[in-house]
Every structure is written in C-alpha cells, then in structure tokens.
Image (tube, helix red, strand yellow):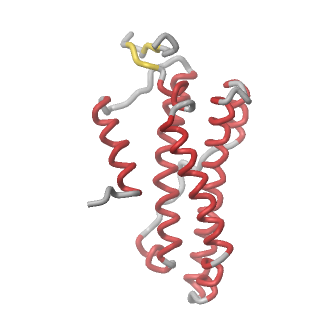
Amino acid sequence: MADVKIVHDSAGAEAIAFGRQFASSEAFKALFREGMALVEDAAAYLDGPGRDQSRLLPRLSALTYANESMRLTTRLMQLASWLLVQRAVAEGEMSSIEATGQLGKMRMNRNDPPFSRDQADALPEAMVSLIEQSIRLQNRVQHLDGIINSEKLGKAPVTSRNAVAMQHMLLQSAFTRNPPPN
C-alpha cells in the first residue's frame, strides 16, 4: 500500500486519495466499458430503429424526440471525453496537468433540466431507456469528477456519506442497470 496517497481534510482527518488510483482500477475499466458501450448503443439506435420510430411520431412528439436525441448525444460525448481523458492519464499518455486543461475546456451539463414523465410518454421506450442510462452514468461520473477535483486541490472529498453508505450506493447503482438473476 506504499503507493496509496493520503490527503487531509480541513479538520486534519486522513483520507485515501481515491481519484488517483481509481483510473487504474478494475472499477474504472468497467465504468469505461459501460460508458463506451452506451455510446455505441445510442449511436446504433439513433441511426437505425430510432430514426424509423421518430418518423412515425406525431409532430410535437417528433420535436421532443429531436431535442432529446441532441441532449443525449451531447451528454454521451461529454461522458466519453471524460472517460477517455481519465484513461489517458491512467495509461501515462497524458499528465494530470494536461488532463485538467482538457477537461477544463469541456464542462458536463450540470444544470440539465430533468427528464419529465410527460416527455418519456411521448418517446419510444428504447429512447427513454438510453436517456435514463445516460443520466445515471452522468451522475456517477460527476460524483467521481468531484472527488478527483477535490483531491487535485489537496482537499479530502467532502461527503455527507460514510464509507459503508458509499459502497452501498455503488452496489445499488451497479445492480440497477443489470439486476442479478433470481
């Protein structure tokens, strides 16, 4: 455990620098694969069945579809960029300073209006599923980004959850997407 970085919060309490080790972990590799698979799934859907389904929608629903497909594409490209930069740092292809510069040019939409039930009712089920998956992934990435940025500033991440609650949340998130077989 000699390569584990310890940081201190404002009260002097010690915490392990999670962000630096995360990008090299199996958990990150799984998150990376999930994110890239979602990008591929969305592209295949939007270029194929989604295009066909959108033509069959009433005018107002078709406008909602067009708007949501743009938001979905933007969200996924931002997530893919973040994942690729983190992987480049983990593999030594980019320094943390270069990564900070690259990520500083790209901001994930943190104030994206919530996806409403009325909008979901107007869209094909596959589109709604892709949007919901992308929002869950975005929330996870934003959380990780916050931890990593706190550590870059030399602060322990501020969180109201304890370690056990955090692990519970991560497990729950993992099983929400792919529930275990009965």
Question: Could you tell me residue 77's position as x and y percent?
Answer: 66, 53
Q: On the rendered image, what quadrant is the N terminus found in?
A: top left
Residue drawn at x 43%, y 13% as measured from the top left: 8
Can you say whether 16 is above or below 109 in the image?
Answer: above
- Give whichever of 80, 61 is nearer the camera: 80
Residue found at the very far left of the displayed protein: 182
Q: Nearer the viewer, residue 22 or 150?
A: 22
Could you say where residue 14 lies in the image, as x and y percent from the top left?
39, 13
Is 27 situated left or right of 163 in this image? right
Callout count: 0
Image quadrant in which you'd find residue 69: bottom right
Residue sitting at x 61%, y 77%: 50
The C terminus lies in quadrant = bottom left
Q: Position of residue 25 (x, y in %)?
A: 52, 32
| Residue at the outermost front position | 182
Image side of residue 39 versus residue 155, left or right: right
At 66% across and 41% down in the image, what residue appears? 84
Residue 156 as seen in the image, left or right of residue 29: left
Residue ID at (52%, 22%): 151
Q: Measured from the top left, where is residue 41 in percent x and y?
A: 59, 64
Which of 8 and 52 lies nearest the eye of the viewer? 52
Q: Relative to 173, is 63 above or below?
A: below
Vertical placement of residue 10 versus 180, above or below: above
Instruction: Specify the quadrant of the image occupied by residue 85.
Output: top right
